[in-house]
Every structure is written in C-alpha cells, then in structure tokens.
Image: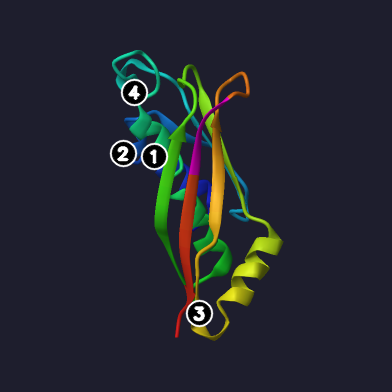
Amino acid sequence: MHHKLFKLLFNFYPPYLFTGIKIAHISQDYRQITVTMKLHFYNKNYVGTHFGGSLFSMTDPFLMTMLINNLGKDYLVWDQDSCIKFLKPGRGTVKAEFKITEELLNEIKENTKDKKKYFPKFETDIIDEKGIVVAKVTKTIYVKRKN
C-alpha cells in the first residue's frame, strides 16, 4: 500500500481516530514512522493525564507493519509480545518514533534462513513535548520465512 494512503486510512481508522492517535510522518519506504497524540477530554484518565491504554495503543501496529512492508510477502510477521512501563504522567502532546534499519532487515533475513523463527525485540520511548520519556514500550515481533 502506498505510504500516503496508509497514513490517510490509519488517521481515520476509528480505534485510533477516537483516541487522538495520528501518524505525523511516514517515510516512503516504511522505515520511519512518527506517531503523535494530543491530550483531549476524550483521552484523559481520572487524574487528567493520558490514558495508559492510549499510550500503549500508540505503539501497537507500527513495527509489524513496517517489517511487513520491508520484508515482503515471503515473510510471516506478527506481534508476539508487548510490555509498557509508565515512567511519568503523560500531558500535552506525546510522540513515539519507530525506525527500521537496513542492518536490522539483514539480521532478520540471516536469522530466518531455513524457515527458522526469529524474535527481534524493539524498545520505543513515548516522549512528551519537553522531551521527557513518559513510557517505555518493549515489543517482540515474530518473524518467519514462509514456505
């Protein structure tokens, strides 16, 4: 899917639209994505900060989507495991940045030779407008070369 169409469809997809999560930037090659979320009345928790589930949702499909688009149809890619650690209250606009490097893609290809499963781990910081890390998300992705 063309990167601009993906961004448009994602930004209007109801589960993300109604949390205020938006793709702010996506590179043409799907190797960099920046996601933002403004604090609104509909995504505040009881104490007036970002709802933790919304912070976690900011990181949900992106690494998997980026790998699918970079590895191609010969690979099976799934989210395997995720964990979030809340460090500070999220206020204002928060963002998460995702990057896939050529070295990582080569590492995945090397480790999935002979149809072996591979489980790369990724850490993503969710930061506020001041650059302070409000949460850390660790994701494990399942990757296997198809038959």
Q: Residue at x 63, y 54 (%)?
A: 100
Q: Is residue 22 above or below residue 72?
A: above
Could you tell me if residue 60 is visible in this image? no
Disc 4 to disc 2: CB gap under 8 Å: no
Q: Earlier in the sequence, mark 3 or mark 2?
A: 2
Residue depth check, mark 3 versus mark 2: number of the one nearer the observer? 3
SS state under label 4: helix
Q: Residue at x 55, y 77 (%)?
A: 112
Residue 57's label in the rendered image is 1
Q: Is residue 73 magenta?
A: no
**What residue would you read off at disc 2?**
15
Q: CA distance from mark 1 to mark 4?
A: 12 Å
Indicate the amino acid at tag 1.
Ser
Q: Would residue 125 be found to the left or right of residue 57 on screen?
A: right
**What residue would you read off at disc 3?**
116
Within 10 Å of disc 4 (Cα), the crowding (few <14, some 14-19, many 20+) is many
Residue 114 x %, y %: 54, 86
Specify start and end residues of the magenta stretch as a single range. 133-137
Q: What secondary structure is the stretch in magenta mostly built from?
A: strand
Could you tell me if residue 132 is visible in this image? yes
- Res. 12 image quadrant: top left
- Name the residue nearer the viewer: 3 or 66: 66
Q: Is residue 78 above or below residue 25?
A: below
Disc 1 to disc 2: CB gap under 8 Å: yes
Q: CA distance from mark 3 to mark 2?
A: 34 Å
Looking at the rendering, in which quadrant would you find the C terminus?
Answer: bottom left
Q: Earlier in the sequence, mark 4 or mark 2?
A: 2
Indicate the amino acid at tag 4.
Asn
The number of discs equals 4
Residue 48 x %, y %: 36, 13
Disc 1 to disc 4: CB gap under 8 Å: no
